[in-house]
Image (cartoon, grey):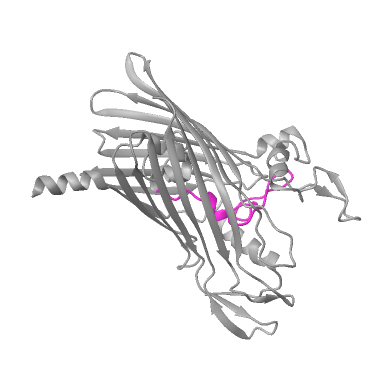
Amino acid sequence: MRRIEMKNRLITVILISVALAGGGNTFGQESSGELNAIQTVVPFLTIAPDSRAGAMGDAGVATSPDVYSMHWNPAKLAFIDGRAGVGISYSPWLRNLVPDINIAYLSGYYRIDEKQVLSGSLLYSSLGDVDFTDIYGNLERTFTPNEWSFDVGYSRLFTDNLSGGIAFRMIYSNLTGGSYSGGVATKPGISVAADISLYHHNDITLFTKDSELAFGLNFSNIGSKMSYSDAQTSDFIPMNMRLGTALTVNLDLYNKITLTADVNKLLVPTPPYYDISTPDSIIAGKDPNVSVPLAIFQSFYDAPEGFKEELREFTLSFGAEYLYNNQFALRAGYFHENETKGNRKYFTAGAGFKLSGFTVDFSYLMPTVQNHPLARTLRFSLAFDISSLRKTGTTTL
């Protein structure tokens, strides 16, 4: 167990954010530049929930649709094969430090007709048992902080090659269980958000090979700020823009390969530089205490060091997938984040197997510059094509 002396709501949020996101260069080496990582609450919303995308450098906005598309790009589900499906995934978190932090994900979809698909998902994060003590170190109680989000989505075909999707999200974060901090009662953080996404794919010929080129765009977690106390200022949730492309080449009847790349940017204000002698005086950058709509636009031009710092805020994901006979897959990828914005850099690898409507995927993460929370951790995901299972059952009977 971990003993945490709660002094104020900000300390709690920072501790949990560090444990989940590994951002702010906390686990990494010192940077030669000015550290200015963007901080948000509920960073668990940005964690890759499935092993397929997790094995491809956390790239997934433009890859072929699957049951986990709800997280990466709801619009992809309009092109998914099958009438209905369910997916389950599990990720142990910070396994090398503590044994009881984990993230679980449940998702599913149902096809209404040829053009429309309904979907839903539940993401749950348990932060393990935490001992709350008083200022003298006496145990007051043990509490298990937890966070979850529940999504409902709708996807629709616009043309034979273009689809759109929208998702609504309820977010709940209970980090303190109502404990008092500095004489002020804390409360669970609650927010509502939405995703808006597009997906386009087109058949092409590349070096005489039948191929497919796809593009995806997802604005996710666009929603209200969150507060853990009536006496504290609300904080931004991780509003994000994800843009990517994927190229799939059919090498022959049984073999195909996919190359994909994603670009991400948090649509959240960058912390400005303040005057040391006058803490409330901003000497570079913009005031971060703005409304959600203004924050989205301001996030593209508010970095204290100007355009060069704005470019550092883009993270890059690269992935590759080899698929044999649509049944066996090998995957690899790389994720890059600038050292002044979190310094997450890691390679990923994984594999997948599919048989009679049942799919299992594995992923493994290898950090290059820091001890990532998922380092040397094997993650797995399960997926079930309900329509295929029904057909198999009918044939057997």
- Where residue 330 sits in the image (x, y, percent)? 33, 38
Determine the main secondary structure of the stretch shown in magenta.
loop
Q: Which residues are magenta?
A: 23-50
Q: Is residue 130 visible?
A: yes
At 37% across and 16% down in the image, what residue appears? 206
| Quadrant in the picture for residue 263 | top right
Number of disc labels: 0
Q: Nearer the viewer, residue 194 or 177?
A: 194
Q: Is residue 283 left or right of residue 251?
A: right
Q: Is residue 281 left or right of residue 104?
A: right
Name above or below for residue 286 compared with residue 186.
above
- Where residue 390 sits in the image (x, y, percent)? 19, 47
Q: Is residue 57 visible?
A: no
| Quadrant in the picture for residue 122 | bottom left
At 70% across and 36% down in the image, what residue appears? 300
- Where residue 15 sits in the image (x, y, percent)? 62, 63
At 16% across and 46% down in the image, what residue appears? 392
| Quadrant in the picture for residue 391 | top left
Name above or below for residue 254 compared with residue 236.
above
Name above or below for residue 333 compared with residue 27.
above
28 in the magenta segment = yes
Q: Nearer the viewer, residue 294 or 238?
A: 294
Q: Nearer the viewer, residue 221 or 381?
A: 221
